[in-house]
Amino acid sequence: MEDKVTVLMQRYELGRQLGQGTFAKVYHARNLKTGMSAAIKVIDKEKILKVGMVEQIKREISSMSMIKHPNVVELYEVMASKTKIYFVMEYAKGGELFSKVAKGKLKEDAARRYFQQLISAVDYCHSRGVCHRDLKPENLLLDENGNLKVSDFGLSALAESKHQDGLLHTTCGTPAYVAPEVINRKGYDGSKADIWSCGVILYVLLAGYLPFHDSNLMEMYRKIGKGDFKFPNWFGPEVRRLLSKILDPNPNTRISIAKIMDNSWFRRGLQPKPRIIQSEVKEPTPIDVDAVFGPNESSSSSTESKQELAKPSNLNAFDIISLSAGFDLSGLFEETEQKKEVRFTSNKPSSIILSKLEEIAKRLRLKVKKKDVGLLKMEGSKAGRKGLLGIDAEIFEITPHFHMVEMKKSSGDTLEYKKMLKQDIRPALKDIVWTWQGEQQQQQTQPQQQQEEVDQQPANVLLPLAVSPLDS
C-alpha cells in the first residue's frame, strides 16, 4: 500500500503514508468524485476486536459524526471491509501549529487568535457531551488558511483504553499538558481537565516553552500538582490573571469556559460569529456504527446487560503509573497516611473475580451490602472492637484480559481487618491472583502463553488518531 497508488472502495485514491501507530496507518487520499483531499486512517479490525474496543469505538464514532465545527477536524465517514476500518477525515494541510512555536514564541495577538479558536472548539464539543482529555501539540493542526483545527475530539477516549505497547508513549509523551486531577487518580471531570490543557497551550504559545518542565519526571508532577510555575516578564497583567485562573490545580475552583469567553483579554479582537439563517443549517448525519462492525463482531445488548454488574472501571495510563509499586504519585498531592488498601492483579475475567469475592464473603460470613458496577461492599455480621468490619473490593480493567483489584477497610478495626486479610482472604484468592502489588516476583505457576498475552497488553498508550503528517 505504501509503494503504489490504491483505490479504496472505488471512492478514494490513497496516496503517500502520513503516519503510523499501534493500530493504524494514516494516508493522504483524494476523493475520486470531487477531487477533494482527505486523510484516511486505516485500522486493523482484528486488533480492535482482540482488545475488546468495539463498543467504545462505536460510541466515539457516534459522537464524532454529530460534531461539525470550523475549528475541529471533521470525520467525514467511516467505512469497513472484512479486515479493516477506514476513518475518512478532513486533511489539515497546514501541518502542526507547534511547528510555528518551535521557531519561537508567538506575538500576543496571534497567540490570542489561536486560543480563541481552541476555546471555541472545546466549548462546542463540550456542549455536545464530548470531551477531548488529551489536548496536546500533536492535536493542534492548521488548515491552508492558517485556522486552527483540533484533531481527535471524541476519538481521544481510544487513547485511554486497552492498548498493547505499554505505558511508555503516554508517560513520556505529553504529561506536561495533563491536569493534576488526572495524574492524581482521583477521578476527574473531562471538561475541566480540557480547560487546564488549554491553559498550558496558551502559556506555550506566548512563552515558547512549557510552564511545568523538569528533567526529573517526579519533580514535574509535583509542580503540576501544586500549580507551581512562573510567568516570563513579557506577560502582561491581564493574561497573567487569566492563566492563574486556568492553571488552578483545584478543578472545583478552576475557571469555566464561559468565564474564559467573557474575559476582557480573551475578547480583544474576537471576530463576531456570522449570522446563520436557520434554514441553511444542515444537521450532521449520524454514521451507522453497526454497519462498520457487523452483528457478530460485538456483544449483544442482552449480553451487555447481563454482564453490567461485573463490568469494571477502566484505568488510564496515569492511573496505572500511580498504582505501580514504588511509584505512587498520590504523595505528591496529598498527605500520606497509613494505607488501608491492598491491590492485586489478575488475568481472570471480571465476572470470575467478582464471583470469587462473593464466595469468600459467604465463607467468612460477610454480608454483601452493595453490588455495583465492578464494586463489592461487604460487612461483618458481628461487631468487633470498633463496630462492624466493612471491606470494599473494586475491580479496574487494564485490558479485557487483565484486571487490578483494590481492597480496603471501609469501617471497623484495622487489626481485625489485617488479620482476616492475611489468614483468610489472601490464601483464598490464590487461584485468581497474578501478583500482589509490591511483590517483585510474578507467580511462576502461570502458563507462558498467559504471560505473553499480558506482556503484550500491559496498559494504556496513545492511539494516534490525528491527521497530522507527523502522527506516529
Image (cartoon, rainbow, N blue to C red):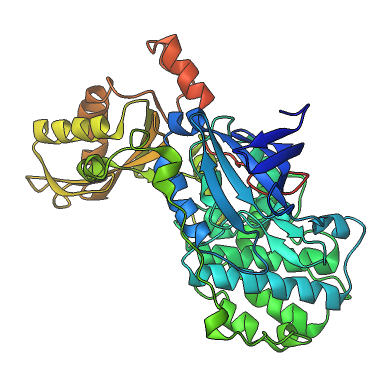
Q: Position of residue 287 (x, y in %)?
A: 47, 54
Work out which residue is located at the far right of the displayed protein and give it.
103
**Picture quadrant of residue 170:** top right
Q: Position of residue 379 (x, y in %)?
A: 15, 46
- Say above or below: 228 vs 404: below
Can residue 361 be spotted in the picture? yes
| Quadrant in the rendering for residue 195 | bottom right
Nearest the viewer among 109 and 363 is 109
Given residues 433 and 53, the one toward you in this image is 53
Point 42% across, 16% down: residue: 450
List x then y, in percent, for residue 111.
81, 72
Tell me residue 31's x, y (percent): 69, 49
Tell me the quadrant of the picture where the N terminus can be found: top right
Tell me: 38 left or right of 255.
right
Residues 18 and 330: in front is 18
Residue, x 35% and y 42% (percent of image)?
Answer: 341
Q: Residue drawn 48% across and 68% down?
A: 128
